[in-house]
C-alpha cells in the first residue's frame, strides 16, 4: 500500500447521475434493513476458506518457500516492480496458477511508464447473462521495503495477503457460472505511484467497459484486537459515493448473513485514496478499498519484517471469507458445478519460448546475434518482441510476427561497455504470455 493524494470530484453527465441515483436507492435499501438471502452454495465456499487454503500462496510469494515457476524452483525475496527477475517470477507465478485453475483470457497486460516496464496479470470468468457487466477483484502484487526493495521486500501482509485471497477465490469460482463477468487483475507498480491500476482503469474506460464494482483487497492479515475491516468509499456528496457504499454494504451484509467471525466490516465514507481503488474513482467507476484497521496498522508495513509469522490468522481468514462471499453475491451465482481437479503442472499450458545470444562476450562496436524459437498459442497474430533491458528500463528493439511455431532472429550493435540484457516477450493478441532473457558482456 502506498500513500496518494486526495481525489477531487468532477461534475457528472446526466446519464451518470441517473445511474448513481439508482445506486443510491440500492444502498439506501440495504442500509434500512433489506436482508441478503443465504445461498447454501456460497455458504459452502465461505466455509471452505481456512489457513491451509491461504498460507501456501502467501509463503510462496513472500520468500518462505521456493515454488516451481516455469518448471524450476525460485525463491521470491521481493516483488518490487524495480527488482527485475523477482518481479517477473512473481507475475509468472500468478499467471501459471490462474491458468491451472482454468480461467479464461489469462495473460499479461504489459506497458511502460517513464522508461520502466510493468506487467499486470489478468484472468477472468465470463458472465453468462450479463457478460459486459464486470466485477473486478484487484489486489496489487508488488511489494516494497524502502531502500532494500530491490533485494528483500517479502510483503507478506502488504500485499501477499490480498493476492492469496484472490487466488483462492479464483480457484473456487473457476468452473462456476455467474450472471456477471468476474475479472481478477493483479496490479503491478502500486508502490511506485499506482502504475498498474492507473493504466488498467484508463484503458478500461477508453474501451467503454462497464465496471459495476471494483474491490481492492490490500493488507488483510494484521489486527491488534478491534476486528475492524475497513471498507473505504468516496465521501458523502461526491459523485459515485452511493455506488461505492452499495458495494461496502454488501460486504457488511455478507458478514452478517453468513455469520463470518474474526472481522467487523466497517464502512468509512472518507475518500481515503491510499490504494488502487482510487484509480477507478478517477475514471468514474464504483470501487472500494478493503483494508485492515488504519487505527491499528501493521507496524512492520514496508519493512523486511513484513512476514507471515506476524499474521493474525482468524482476522485474515475472516477477511478472505467476506471478500469471497461479496464477489460471489455481486456477480450473481447462476449454477454451481463440481470443481474439477486443477491441472497438475501449470507450466504445461503456456507456449515455449527460447532466446540465445551469440557471442555472449563482445567488444564495443561488434554485433550480437539474437535468435530463438517460439510455439504458437492458438492465435493468428503471435508476436515476439525483443527489448534491451537496462536497470528497470526497456528499450524496444524489434517486433516479429510469427505465423506458426518457428524461429526468429535479429542482430544488435553493442555501442557501450557493460552488461547488456536482452528480453524476448511472446505475445498473442493483446496479452503477453511468456518472457525469456539473456545477458551479454560488452567490453571495451
Image (cartoon, rainbow, N blue to C red):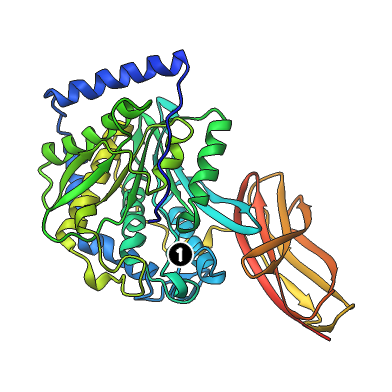
Q: Residues within 10 Å of mark 1 (few under 14, many from 20)?
A: some
The x, y position of residue 369, in whole percent, is 83, 73
The x, y position of residue 93, in whole percent, is 46, 63
The x, y position of residue 83, in whole percent, is 53, 70
The x, y position of residue 219, in whole percent, is 30, 57
Q: Residue furthest right?
A: 365
The tally of labels here is: 1
**Residue found 84% across the figure and 65% down from its top:** 410
Question: Which one is nearer the viewer's eye here, 353 or 422?
Answer: 422
Question: Which one is nearer the viewer's eye here, 427 or 443?
Answer: 443
Q: Quadrant of residue 309?
A: bottom left
Question: Which one is nearer the viewer's eye here, 167 or 103?
Answer: 167
**Residue found 45% across the figure and 61% down from its top:** 142
When the figure is inspected, residue 48 is found, relative to residue 9, above or below; the finding is below
Residue highlighted by disc 1: 345
Q: Quadrant of residue 256?
A: top left
When the figure is inspected, residue 75 is found, relative to residue 11, above or below; the finding is below
**Residue found 55% across the figure and 44% down from its top:** 199
Quadrant that contains the C terminus: bottom right
Q: Is residue 334 visible?
A: no
In the rendered structure, the answer to whether residue 43 lies left or right of residue 291 reads left
Q: Is residue 373 visible?
A: yes
Q: Quadrant of residue 278?
A: top left
Quadrant that contains the N terminus: bottom left
Q: Secondary structure at mark 1?
A: loop
When the figure is inspected, residue 291 is found, relative to residue 409, above or below; the finding is above
**Residue found 39% across the figure and 48% down from its top:** 275
Question: Which one is nearer the viewer's eye here, 86 or 196?
Answer: 196
Amino acid at each position: 500500500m502506498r500513500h496518494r493524494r486526495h481525489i477531487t470530484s468532477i461534475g457528472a453527465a446526466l446519464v451518470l447521475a441517473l445511474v448513481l441515483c439508482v445506486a443510491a436507492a440500492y444502498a439506501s435499501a440495504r442500509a434500512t434493513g433489506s436482508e441478503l438471502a443465504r445461498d447454501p452454495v456460497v455458504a459452502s465456499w465461505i466455509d471452505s476458506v481456512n489457513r491451509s487454503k491461504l498460507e501456501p500462496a502467501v509463503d510462496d510469494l513472500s520468500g518462505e518457500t521456493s515454488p516451481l515457476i516455469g518448471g524450476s524452483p525460485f525463491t521470491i525475496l521481493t516483488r518490487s516492480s524495480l527488482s527485475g527477475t523477482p518481479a517477473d517470477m512473481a507475475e509468472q507465478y500468478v499467471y501459471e496458477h490462474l491458468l491451472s485453475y482454468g480461467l479464461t483470457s489469462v495473460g499479461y497486460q504489459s506497458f511502460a511508464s517513464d522508461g520502466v516496464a510493468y506487467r499486470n496479470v489478468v484472468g477472468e470468468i465470463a458472465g453468462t447473462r450479463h457478460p459486459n457487466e464486470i466485477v473486478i477483484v484487484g489486489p496489487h502484487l508488488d511489494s516494497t521495503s524502502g531502500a532494500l526493495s530491490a533485494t528483500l521486500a517479502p510483503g507478506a501482509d502488504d500485499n501477499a495477503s490480498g493476492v492469496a485471497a484472490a487466488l483462492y477465490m479464483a480457484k473456487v469460482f473457476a468452473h462456476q457460472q455467474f450472471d456477471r463477468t468476474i475479472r481478477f487483475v493483479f496490479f503491478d507498480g502500486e508502490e511506485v505511484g499506482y502504475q498498474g491500476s492507473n493504466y488498467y482503469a484508463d484503458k478500461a474506460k477508453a474501451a467503454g467497459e462497464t465496471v459495476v464494482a471494483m474491490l481492492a483487497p490490500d493488507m488483510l492479515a494484521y489486527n491488534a484486537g478491534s476486528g475492524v475491516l475497513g471498507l473505504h468509499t468516496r465521501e458523502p456528496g461526491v459523485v459515485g459515493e452511493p455506488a461505492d457504499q452499495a458495494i461496502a454494504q454488501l460486504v457488511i451484509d455478507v458478514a452478517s448473513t453468513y455469520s463470518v467471525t474474526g472481522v467487523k466490516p466497517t464502512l468509512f465514507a472518507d475518500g481515503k485514496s491510499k490504494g488502487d481503488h482510487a484509480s477507478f474513482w478517477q475514471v468514474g467507476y464504483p470501487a472500494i478499498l478493503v483494508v485492515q484497521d488504519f487505527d491499528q496498522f501493521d507496524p512492520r508495513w514496508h519493512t523486511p519484517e513484513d512476514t507471515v509469522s506476524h499474521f493474525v490468522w482468524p482476522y485474515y481468514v475472516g477477511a478472505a471469507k467476506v471478500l469471497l462471499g461479496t464477489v460471489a453475491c455481486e456477480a450473481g451465482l447462476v449454477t454451481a458445478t463440481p470443481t474439477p481437479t486443477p491441472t497438475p503442472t501449470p507450466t504445461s499450458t503456456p507456449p515455449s519460448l527460447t532466446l540465445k545470444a551469440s557471442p555472449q562476450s563482445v567488444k564495443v562496436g561488434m554485433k550480437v546475434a539474437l535468435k530463438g524459437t517460439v510455439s504458437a498459442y492458438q492465435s493468428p497474430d503471435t508476436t515476439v518482441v525483443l527489448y534491451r533491458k537496462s536497470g528497470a528500463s526497456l528499450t524496444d528493439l524489434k517486433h516479429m510476427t510469427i505465423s506458426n511455431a518457428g524461429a526468429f532472429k535479429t542482430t544488435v550493435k553493442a555501442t557501450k561497455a557493460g552488461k547488456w540484457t536482452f528480453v524476448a516477450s511472446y505475445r498473442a493478441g493483446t496479452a503477453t504470455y511468456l518472457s525469456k532473457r539473456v545477458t551479454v558482456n560488452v567490453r571495451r
